[in-house]
Amino acid sequence: MVDGIDNRIIGLLRKNSRYSFAEIGRIISLSPSSVRERIQKLEDLGIIESYSLKVNYALLGYGMEVFILLKIFDGKLKYFLEEIHDFVEVEEAYRITGPYNIHIRAILRDQKHLQDFVDRLINYGSPTTLLILSDIEKNL
């Protein structure tokens, strides 16, 4: 189904999803048409689901990134799951196991914005906030 060449293509696309078929082909010694066919196969199989954009939020005035662990109050999970999409600060959110129900990554302007965001979350549960100091890039 997926071989070593496909895995190399996936690795390159994870680093930069804008690589052209020709650039990938040069790196792994395949023709651009072979790369295109392999990527199309990976998309058709659902292995490659989508391509994404990484934004430098600090340059847009959002200089604070946080993780928030949220322990939802009894009876509030359904409401939170319905309303989380209204929180523009939320970049990613996951339901998790353990003492917390929700793991959020949020993008905020500053401490005041964080305070206001936490004040909104308190309606649903008890938040624990972790300030992200830096991003450690994986060497893939």
Image: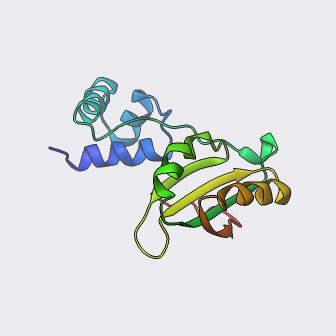
Q: Quadrant of the N terminus?
A: top left
Residue 30's spot in the image, x, y percent? Answer: 30, 34
Instruction: Determine which quarter of the picture holds residue 127.
Output: bottom right
Nearest to the observer: residue 81 or residue 59: 81
Q: Quadrant of the C terminus?
A: bottom left
Residue at 71 percent across and 60 percent down: it is 118
Residue 133's spot in the image, x, y percent? Answer: 71, 67
Position of 68 compared to 19: left or right? right
Residue 26's spot in the image, x, y percent? Answer: 40, 35
Please tell me whether residue 51 is drawn above or below residue 99 in the rendered image.
Answer: above
Please tell me whether residue 48 is drawn above or below residue 140 in the rendered image.
Answer: above
Nearest to the observer: residue 133 or residue 27: 133
Position of 92 compared to 33: left or right? right
**Residue ranking furthest to the top:** 33
Number of marks in the rendered image:
0
**Residue ranking furthest to the left:** 1
Nearest to the observer: residue 133 or residue 20: 133
Residue at 50 percent across and 44 percent down: it is 82
Residue 62's spot in the image, x, y percent? Answer: 78, 48
Please tell me whether residue 24 is drawn above or below residue 104 in the rendered image.
Answer: above
Instruction: Determine which quarter of the picture holds residue 112.
Output: bottom right
Position of 9 compared to 117: left or right? left
Residue at 48 percent across and 57 percent down: it is 77
Residue at 26 percent across and 45 percent down: it is 5
**Residue ranking furthest to the bottom:** 99
